[in-house]
Image (spheres, rainbow, N blue to C red):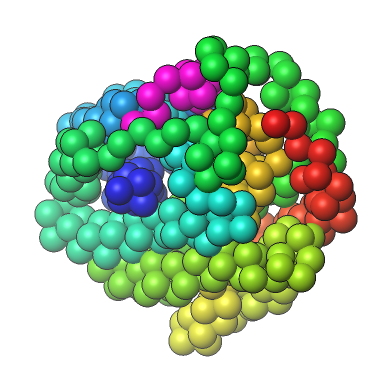
Amino acid sequence: MLTAVYASSQVDRQIMGMLLEPIRLELGASDTAMGFLVGLTFAIFYATLGMPIAMLADRTNRRNIITAAITVWSAMTVLCGYAQTFVQMALARIGVGVGEAGSTPPSHSIISDLFPPEKRGTAMGVFALGVNIGLLLAYLGGGWISENYGWRTTFIAVGLPGLLIALVLYLTVAEPRRGAADGTAPRQGNDAPRFRAVAAYMWRVRSTRHLTIGAAIAGFIGYGFTLWMPTFLIRSHGLSPTEVGLVLALMTGLVGALGTFTAGKLADVLARRDERWRSWVVAAGKGGYVPFLAGVFMVDDLTTALVLYVIPAFFGGFYLAPTFALIQSLVSLRMRALASSIVLFVLNIIGMGFGPQLVGIMSDYFAPEYGKESLRMSLLILTFLNLWCAYHYFTAGRTLKEDMARRPG
């Protein structure tokens, strides 16, 4: 059920990638303005509200918080379909961000109470499949519905199912006992640490510090590509929305899902020999696919570009499961939801907030020289940030054993 909730959030969040071009044309906006719409307008509220909601989740019923969150974001997604101006659309997207702020940190905390540390990477890998399932649905459904019925109907169609998921979640999911999978339980009472204590601890511990920075860079890259790749394929290769939806559903939805699950499972398997591989597996994946991703934007032939894109599609979400499984294992029981929200705050403010925005700005900057290929140049430059991301995951692994051994109770 938590994976279904996560998939719903990703559909409602990422559907904008399929609808950027028709919305831009109808509202008469620039690429910079559209980057702002899909970036900062969503990310600021999503990231900042995530922390107070996570603090509440460390103290109260997490299932109820998630139920309320999905109800809000689904309703606001439907309202996007009725927006008549750029401002109205921005306000509706802010509403989606407000709702989605309450979902992922409580979900991470619940999963950590259901699975022990040695299986947590695999469990997080299953949960992280929600990203790929959501993208698959957004690309397939979004492309076909928008081409045949328009972008307004698309928002309504993807928003309504979330309301049903909220009801099923509330009626079928029970709140687990905190610490059950770790063989311990937190002290009785309202003993969850405050934000400053959790943030200070995460900054002090070297592995959590580098994991957070690495995740932020990975998010910066990931959101930049996810939200602009459909537009790139339409502008540079002449694909229709339906064709773009099918291509990206197969790549990001199916191939990406295999990679996302593999990362969590592989981290658990390799960690039996050396715990440091829980982080190093991400470093290897993010650094290794750079030549293939760069090739996607350096060739003009569509078939060659798509063949090259298989590798980046597989490794694109490689950081998700290992990162959040490690964060949950590096902090105490009553820190889990808040620690997850801090990572998501940094990831989304930097990643979602500025990744799509920077791509849009660079595209407008390159437009006088490169014309419709300006977006290609922007995405090519973004590719090489993966090497910086890989460095932080490698560095995080170097002290991982010691940091896990010193985890507070």
Question: Residue at coordinates 30% horizontally, 36% vertically from top-left?
Answer: 174
Q: Position of residue 97 (x, y in %)?
A: 41, 30
Snapshot quadrant of residue 118: bottom right
Magenta region includes residue 305: no
Snapshot quadrant of residue 330: top right
Direction from residue 292 to residue 237 in the image, left or right: left
> How many circles with numbers are drawn on the protein?
0
Direction from residue 193 to residue 26 in the image, left or right: left
| Magenta segment | 51-63
Is residue 50 in view? yes
Work out which residue is located at the far left of the displayed protein and give it: 149
Snapshot quadrant of residue 95: top left
Is 16 situated above or below 66?
below
Work out which residue is located at the far front of the displayed protein and give it: 183
Is residue 96 in view? no
Question: Residue at coordinates 56% horizontally, 51% vertically from top-left?
Answer: 116
Q: Position of residue 144 (x, y in %)?
A: 20, 63
Please name the predominant secondary structure of the magenta segment in the image. Answer: helix
Question: Residue at coordinates 28% horizontally, 40% vertically from top-left?
Answer: 173
Q: Position of residue 359 (x, y in %)?
A: 58, 49
Magenta region includes residue 61: yes
Quadrant holding the C terminus: top right
Q: Position of residue 374 (x, y in %)?
A: 57, 59
Is 20 situated above or below 78?
below
Is 332 situated above or below 252?
above
Direction from residue 183 to residue 97 in the image, left or right: left
Question: Residue at coordinates 66% horizontally, 57% vertically from top-left?
Answer: 382
Near-viewer residue (169 or 211): 169
